[in-house]
Image: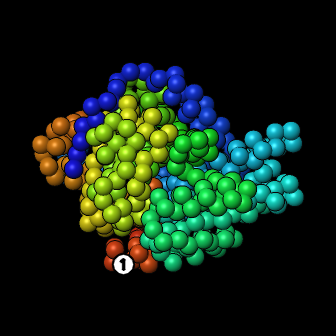
């Protein structure tokens, strides 16, 4: 389903929003993250999928590949670490701490009594656990019933203590808040709720690194006309919207926000004009997007800054995963996880419906950006859905790039 956002605006970036998320804040977060050895140095690739663009009748299709940001396998590696560092800096303002020393673990003695906690569908918790291990504090992660044992093991491998609950993601968010209040722990969550906005803001500011790299990569090229962004609670989409809006002003790209049809909290928010809950079961193969409640903080950016809201079925995401893995049309193969392929899945669905494509402006002059937000973060699930292991796809990609001598936009 596709919904035009009646509240989308084409003005300069509003000052109240800039006070929350800004280009300057994103660039500072980016500098701090460059100190963390868990991340690969330099920007992630921005690939031009020329074969796909020709097939779809579009001017250009660009894919930003966050699957190779780090061993964590997803864009979440940019959010939780920055939020944790900023939390520590606020807690010890007189200790003259800095991000580089914190990431290097040089203040473990100071932080050994600090416990951080968060709910997760997988990737955020894994990133927080990795950051906590680097800084030297304790980490507790709350997992709901639909998080696989494979994802649990990946989080625990970084030293996090796991708390399992029944229910869904939103129930795990509530349980993390309850435990923190009872035990004096600190919630480091990527979703906001009443009275809790500072840390989700910091998480989103970390995500701005992705947009900063894209803008730099395209400095000598035309900017994208359309950006497809994964939904979830809205934090990722809000961060990218924010950066492009401040950079491009009223000429910002058209934004399509994508989420599972059974986890349609952002779609419902656009219908109702306020942060809303999903109407479906929330459970989806797109585990990272299986969220039932909109982040009110993220909604401040998406309500005026997102032009379209779209829902799609799980089958569409799986088909996009397979398409990227094959590398059809002379394009390189790409490992995209279930949530990572969602943006492309939405693009493919729209182009297959000419009337909808025309409404959104997807034609020969369209320059479309999608973000592969994750790789095979659950390898067994990836193999089951795509029909081959991620390592095999990665090997084909490496061979492709060696033949072409690298291939970026």
Residue 234 image position (x, y, % from top left): 44, 46
Residue 301, image quadrant: top left
Residue beneath disc 1: 384
Callout 1: SS:
helix
**Relative vertical location of residue 363 with respect to residue 393 in this rendering, above or below:** above
Q: Residue furthest front?
A: 182
- Residue at position x 51%, y 77% in the image: 150
- 104 vs 229, left or right, is right
User: Where residue 304 appears, x then y in whole percent?
Assistant: 38, 30
Residue 404 makes an appearance in the image: no
Nearer-the-camera pick, 57 or 33: 33
Asked whether residue 278 appears in the rendered view, the answer is yes
Residue that appears at 56% across and 73% down: 164
Q: Which of 24/84 is in front?
A: 84
Please give the name of the residue rendered at 14% of the width and 49% of the height, measured from the top-left corner: 353
- Which quarter of the image is occupied by the C terminus? top left
> How many marks do you count on the picture?
1
Can you say whether 306 is above or below 332 in the image? above
In this rendered view, identify the residue nearer to me: 257 or 65: 257
Up/down of 213 relative to 67, above or below: above
Q: How is the image coloured?
A: rainbow
Residue that appears at 47% across and 23% down: 14
* Label 1 crowd (10 A; few <14 / some 14-19 / many >=20): few
Nearest the viewer among 132 and 223 is 132
State the image quarter where residue 308 is shown.
top left
Snapshot quadrant of residue 361: top left
The x, y position of residue 265, in whole percent, is: 36, 50
């Amino acid at each position: 389903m596709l919904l035009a956002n009646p509240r989308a605006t084409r003005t300069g970036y509003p000052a109240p929003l800039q006070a929350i998320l800004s280009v300057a804040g994103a660039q500072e977060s980016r500098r701090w993250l460059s100190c963390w050895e868990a991340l690969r140095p330099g920007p992630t690739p921005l690939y031009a999928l020329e074969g796909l663009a020709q097939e779809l009748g579009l001017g250009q299709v660009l894919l930003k590949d966050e699957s190779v940001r780090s061993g964590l396998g997803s864009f979440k590696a940019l959010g939780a670490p920055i939020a944790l560092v900023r939390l520590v800096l606020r807690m010890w303002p007189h200790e003259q701490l800095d991000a580089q020393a914190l990431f290097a673990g040089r203040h473990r003695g100071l932080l050994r009594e600090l416990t951080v906690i968060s709910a997760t569908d997988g990737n955020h918790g894994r990133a927080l656990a990795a950051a906590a291990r680097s800084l030297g504090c304790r980490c507790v992660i709350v997992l709901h019933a639909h998080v696989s044992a494979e994802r649990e093991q990946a989080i625990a491998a970084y030293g996090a203590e796991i708390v399992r609950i029944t229910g869904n993601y939103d129930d795990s968010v509530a349980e993390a808040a309850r435990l923190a209040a009872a035990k004096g722990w600190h919630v480091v969550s990527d979703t906001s709720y009443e009275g809790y906005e500072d840390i989700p803001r910091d998480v989103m500011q970390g995500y701005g690194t992705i947009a900063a790299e894209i803008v730099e990569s395209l400095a000598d090229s035309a900017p994208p006309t359309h950006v497809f962004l994964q939904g979830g609670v809205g934090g990722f989409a809000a961060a990218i919207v924010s950066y492009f809006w401040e950079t491009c002003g009223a000429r910002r790209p058209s934004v399509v926000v994508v989420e599972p049809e059974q986890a349609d909290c952002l779609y419902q928010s656009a219908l109702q004009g306020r942060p809303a809950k999903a109407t479906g079961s929330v459970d989806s193969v797109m585990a990272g997007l299986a969220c039932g409640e909109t982040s009110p903080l993220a909604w401040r950016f998406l309500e005026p800054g997102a032009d379209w809201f779209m829902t799609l079925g799980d089958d569409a995401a799986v088909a996009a995963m397979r398409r990227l893995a094959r590398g059809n049309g002379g394009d390189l193969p790409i490992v995209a996880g279930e949530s990572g392929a969602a943006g492309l899945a939405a693009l493919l669905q729209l182009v297959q419906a000419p009337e909808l494509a025309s409404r959104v402006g997807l034609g020969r002059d369209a320059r479309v950006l999608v973000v592969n937000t994750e790789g095979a973060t659950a390898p067994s699930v990836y193999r089951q859905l795509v029909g081959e292991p991620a390592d095999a796809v990665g090997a084909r990609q490496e061979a492709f790039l060696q033949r072409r001598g690298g291939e970026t936009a």
